[in-house]
Image (tube, grey):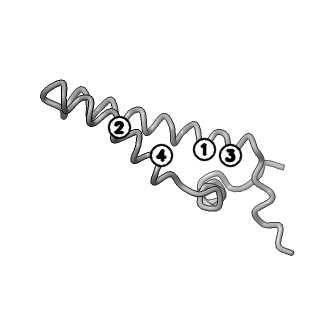
Amino acid sequence: MDNKEDDITPAQLKKAWIVYSVLTVVVILVLVFFVASDNEEKLFFSLMTAAAAYVFRPTERFMKRQIKRFGGGASR
């Protein structure tokens, strides 16, 4: 059995999900404040961006691979 993905700690995974959530909020804010021209577009951009981020969220496997890629694995 291969344990290469087991060296990712839960704290690292939690940080990755926090970064993903913050980036989603930043995209929503940019769309609402700089792109939308009326209240209907502001509502649409805020709701649909959040829904799309939820539907197209990365899998745990993808997140673990990206943590290894950018974070260098576990800090042991």
Which numbered disc flags the more N-terminal residue, 2 or 4?
Answer: 2
Q: Which mark is residue 24?
A: none
Residue 56 lies left or right of residue 31; in this view the side is: right
Residue 10 lies left or right of residue 16; in this view the side is: right
Which numbered disc flags the more N-terminal residue, 1 or 4?
Answer: 1
- Residue drawn where x is 18% and y is 24% of the image: 39
Residue count near mark 4 (Cα–Cα under 10 Å), binned few <14, some 14–19, many ≥20: few
Task: Tell me where residue 61 appears, x and y as whole percent.
Answer: 65, 61
Element on which disc 2 rests: helix
Q: Which mark is residue 27?
A: 2
Residue 2 lies left or right of residue 53; in this view the side is: right
Q: Which mark is residue 54?
A: 4
Comparing 69 with 62, the one in front is 62
Whether residues under marks 1 and 4 lie with C-beta atoms below 8 angstroms apart, the answer is no
Element on which disc 4 rests: helix
Question: In the rendered image, which quarter is residue 23 located in?
Answer: top left
Q: Amino acid at mark 2?
A: Val
Q: CA distance from mark 2 to mark 4?
A: 13 Å
Q: CA distance from mark 1 to mark 4?
A: 15 Å
Q: CA distance from mark 4 to mark 3?
A: 17 Å
Q: Which residue is mark 1?
A: 16
Q: Amino acid at mark 1?
A: Ala
Whether residues under marks 2 and 4 lie with C-beta atoms below 8 angstroms apart, the answer is no
Q: CA distance from mark 2 to mark 3?
A: 21 Å
